[in-house]
Image: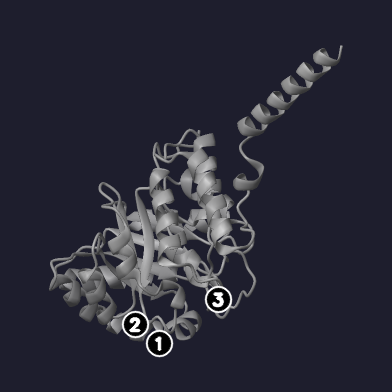
C-alpha cells in the first residue's frame, strides 16, 4: 500500500516565475492584489518578485516597493530571487521579506551557459562567496537548487549520478565552511522528467542522504507535471513549487510556446483527492486562478479552474435540474 505524506507544503511561484514571462507588465497594485488573494487562500509561502535588472526583467521592477505595499505575511513567508550580491543586498533591505540562503547550479553545462553564461564548474567556484555573503548577515546556507535536474534540450538526459555528484560537492563545500545542506530542490526546467525518472532520482538521493529534504519544481512542458508529482508523493516527497493557473516557464529552455509550471490549483485538487492536507482553500484558489487569467489577459492552462471539481459540477447540474423541475411544475 502506498504511503503518501499526511501534509504537503506548496511554495507558490506564480507572482515571480509566472509573471516574469508575461508580455503584459502588471502594475504594482495588480501584483499586490494577486499576492493578497493567494495569501487569503491559505498559501503559506510564495515568491513575490526578484531583485534583478529591470531592463532585463521589467515585469519584476519595483519588487521592494511591492513588498512595502503588502501586509505583514506572518505566519506565512514572502520570498524573492536574486542572482548577485547587489540583488542580495536589495533583498535584505526590503520590508516583509524572508531571506533564506540558497545556492544554484545547473546539472547541464548547455543550459548553464545559456542561462547565466557560465559553466557549472564556474558557478560552483562562486559558492564560497555566496556562503560568506549570507553568513555576514547571519543567514545559514541550507538549500541547493539544481536546475535541469532531469534533462536538458541542449545536453540530453541527466543521470541521477550527475545530480548526486553536485549535491555531494555542495555538501563538502558547505561542511568546510561550517554549514549544513538541509534541502535540495530538483527543478525540471525543460520538462524532461517522467514519473520513473522522478522516482529513481528521489530514491537515490534519499538512500544516500536519508535526512535530506527534497523539493520538486516541476514544469508541465509535455503534460507530465501532475504525473511526476504523484510519483514524488508516492516516494514521500512533501514539498513542491507550483504556479497559479499553470503560469511560467523558462525563457532559456529552448521550448518556445510551452506551457509553464505545475498548476497550483490542479495539484491541490490532486492532494485533496488523495486525502493529503495542504492548508489551502481550493475554492478560493480557483478564484485566484481566474483573477490571474484576467490580469494577464489570456487563457491559462489550468484545468480545475475551467472544469471545477466533480462535486462542484455535480452541484451545478443538480441545481439546474431542480430549477427545471420547478419550471415544469409551474407550467403544469
Name the one closer to the observer, 230 or 133: 133
Q: Position of residue 143 (x, y in %)?
A: 29, 63
Q: Are marks 2 and 1 in contact (CB under 8 Å)?
A: yes
The numbered mark at residue 311 is none
Q: Is residue 86 left or right of residue 44?
A: left
How many marks are shown on the rendered structure? Answer: 3
Q: Are marks 3 and 2 in contact (CB under 8 Å)?
A: no
> Which corner quadrant of the image does residue 127 belong to?
bottom left
Q: Is residue 87 above or below residue 97?
A: below
Name the one closer to the observer, 72 or 168: 72
At a point 60% along the width and 46% down the height, the residue shown is: 305
Q: Is residue 19 left or right of residue 136?
A: right
Q: Is label 1 in a helix, a strand or a loop? A: loop
Task: Name the residue carrying label 1.
Answer: 118
Task: Name the residue carrying label 3.
Answer: 253
Q: Are marks 3 and 1 in contact (CB under 8 Å)?
A: no
Q: Is label 3 in a helix, a strand or a loop? A: loop
Mark 3 or 2, closer to the camera: 3
The numbered mark at residue 123 is 2
Whole-angstrom CA distance, mark 3 to mark 2, is: 18 Å
At a point 28% along the width and 84% down the height, the residue shown is: 125
Outermost residue toward the right? 332
Q: Residues within 10 Å of mark 3 (few under 14, many from 20)?
A: some
Instruction: Answer whether residue 147 is visible to the viewer in this image.
Output: yes
Amino acid at each position: 500500500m502506498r504511503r503518501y505524506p499526511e501534509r504537503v507544503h506548496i511554495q507558490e511561484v506564480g507572482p515571480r516565475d509566472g509573471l516574469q514571462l508575461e508580455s503584459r507588465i502588471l502594475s504594482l497594485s495588480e501584483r499586490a492584489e494577486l499576492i493578497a488573494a493567494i495569501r487569503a487562500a491559505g498559501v503559506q509561502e510564495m515568491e513575490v518578485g526578484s531583485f534583478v535588472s529591470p531592463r532585463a526583467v521589467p515585469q519584476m521592477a519595483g519588487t521592494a516597493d511591492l513588498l512595502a505595499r503588502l501586509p505583514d505575511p506572518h505566519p506565512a513567508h514572502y520570498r524573492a530571487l536574486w542572482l548577485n550580491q547587489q540583488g542580495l543586498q536589495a533583498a535584505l533591505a526590503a520590508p516583509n521579506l524572508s531571506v533564506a540562503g540558497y545556492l544554484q547550479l545547473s546539472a547541464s553545462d548547455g543550459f548553464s551557459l545559456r542561462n547565466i553564461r557560465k559553466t557549472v564548474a564556474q558557478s560552483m567556484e562562486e559558492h564560497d562567496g555566496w556562503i560568506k555573503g549570507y553568513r555576514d548577515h547571519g543567514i545559514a546556507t541550507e538549500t541547493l537548487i539544481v536546475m535541469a535536474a532531469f534533462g536538458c534540450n541542449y545536453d540530453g538526459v541527466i543521470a541521477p549520478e550527475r545530480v548526486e555528484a553536485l549535491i555531494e560537492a555542495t555538501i563538502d563545500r558547505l561542511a568546510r565552511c561550517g554549514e549544513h545542506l538541509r534541502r535540495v530542490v530538483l527543478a525540471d526546467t525543460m520538462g524532461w522528467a517522467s514519473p520513473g525518472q522522478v522516482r529513481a532520482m528521489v530514491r537515490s538521493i534519499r538512500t544516500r542522504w536519508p535526512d535530506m529534504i527534497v523539493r520538486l519544481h516541476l514544469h508541465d512542458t509535455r503534460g507530465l507535471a501532475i504525473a511526476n508529482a504523484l510519483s514524488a508523493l508516492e516516494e514521500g516527497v512533501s514539498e513542491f513549487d507550483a504556479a497559479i493557473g499553470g503560469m511560467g516557464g523558462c525563457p532559456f529552455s529552448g521550448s518556445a510556446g510551452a506551457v509553464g509550471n505545475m498548476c497550483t490549483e490542479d495539484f491541490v485538487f490532486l492532494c485533496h483527492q488523495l486525502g493529503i492536507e495542504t492548508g489551502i482553500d481550493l475554492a478560493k484558489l480557483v478564484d485566484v486562478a481566474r483573477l490571474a487569467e484576467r490580469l494577464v489577459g489570456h487563457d491559462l492552462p489550468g484545468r480545475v479552474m475551467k472544469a471545477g471539481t466533480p462535486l462542484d459540477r455535480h452541484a451545478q447540474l443538480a441545481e439546474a435540474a431542480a430549477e427545471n423541475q420547478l419550471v415544469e411544475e409551474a407550467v403544469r
